[in-house]
């Protein structure tokens, strides 16, 4: 169902955008495009773009639009018109939202739905403090009680898990500040276009997933 949906998952660091995208991509049969994952891929490959992005990411700052917009829009426009996508982490300021709209309108239609997952600050801090990410498929997860990072493997692909460098307390604080200052204004952009749905995100992964699915159901 909903094949071809053009969905933006929106929310602060730790809201569960990546977690929900993992659950939705097979169900919707659309590709997941995460701007943060794109940068981390370049970083692992040691490309000049990855090295440039690293300095900003590790401090919790946004990577400049001059770098970000081209790499994300290239990816979005490489997808065929009727395929759809789940965008996670982009757009992150009003300029990025405008550029995405220009690129999509030139090609057929705009974003169909923006799901804003809102989560309280103490819960964001708790989640990011315990988040692990797969080196292989980049799926996020957390350590359960009694588990240790050395023996736990990715539940999606069995890959090795690691902690993101930008999940240290200082970078997390800055990422949340930047979200409030630069990213939240994008909500007004999509509210005006009538495609924004707000859902509460403090609940369990499964409960949030049910809410996301009902928000995007036709
Ligand atoms: P990015 O990778 O996009 O990071 P982010 O937006 O800060 O979001 P996170 O990935 O930290 O959180 P998430 O919402 O995906 O949560 P997750 O599902 O992992 O960006 C990183 C950096 O790249 C930026 O700071 C910037 O420098 C740069 N960048 C990226 N895009 C850019 C752009 N457009 N412009 C400029 N710069 C850009 O979940 C978090 C944890 O919580 C996990 O452990 C998970 O298991 C757990 N969890 C999830 N849901 C639940 C739940 N319901 N209950 C309990 N635990 C949960
Ligand atoms: Mg993420």
Image: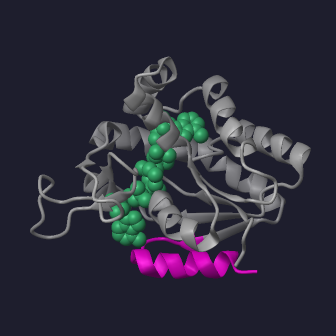
The residues colored magenta run 199-218
Instruction: Decide which of 103, 125 is in the foreground and name it.
Output: 103
Q: Is residue 87 magenta?
A: no
- Figure check: 58 above or below 8: above
Examine the rendered structure and indicate whether residue 162 appears above or below residue 112.
Answer: above
**In this rendering, position of residue 158 left or right of residue 149:** right
Expressed as whole percent of the image width and height from the top left, the position of residue 52 reads 48, 20
Compared to residue 127, the image places residue 136 above or below, namely: above
Which residue is at 52% across, 62% downward?
21
Looking at the picture, tell me which residue is in the foreground, 77 or 180: 77
Q: Quadrant of residue 144?
A: bottom left
Q: Nearer the viewer, residue 182 or 31?
A: 31
Q: Is residue 122 visible?
A: no
- Return the x and y of residue 212 as percentages of the image width and height: 58, 75
Quarter of the image for residue 7 reads bottom right
**Extreme residue in the top direction:** 48
Which quadrant of the view contains residue 40? Answer: top left
The spot of residue 114 in percent (x, y) is 69, 62
């Amino acid at each position: 169902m909903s094949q071809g949906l053009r969905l933006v998952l929106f929310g602060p660091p730790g809201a569960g955008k990546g977690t929900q995208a993992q659950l939705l991509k097979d169900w919707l049969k659309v590709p997941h495009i995460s701007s943060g994952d794109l940068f981390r891929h370049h970083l692992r490959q040691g490309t000049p773009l990855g090295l440039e992005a690293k300095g900003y990411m590790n401090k919790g700052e946004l990577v400049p639009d001059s770098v970000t917009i081209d790499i994300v829009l290239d990816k979005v426009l490489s997808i065929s018109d009727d395929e759809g996508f789940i965008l996670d982490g982009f757009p992150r300021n009003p300029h990025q939202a405008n550029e995405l709209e220009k690129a999509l309108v030139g090609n057929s239609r705009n974003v169909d739905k923006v799901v804003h997952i809102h989560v309280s600050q103490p819960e964001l801090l708790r989640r990011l403090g315990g988040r692990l990410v797969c080196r292989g498929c980049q799926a996020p997860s957390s350590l359960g009680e009694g588990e240790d990072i050395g023996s736990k493997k990715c539940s999606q692909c069995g890959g090795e898990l690691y902690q993101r460098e930008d999940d240290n307390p200082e970078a997390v604080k800055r990422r949340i500040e930047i979200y409030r200052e630069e990213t939240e204004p994008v909500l007004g952009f999509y509210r005006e276009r009538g495609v924004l749905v707000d859902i509460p995100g403090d609940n369990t992964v499964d409960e949030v997933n049910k809410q996301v699915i009902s928000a995007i159901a036709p």
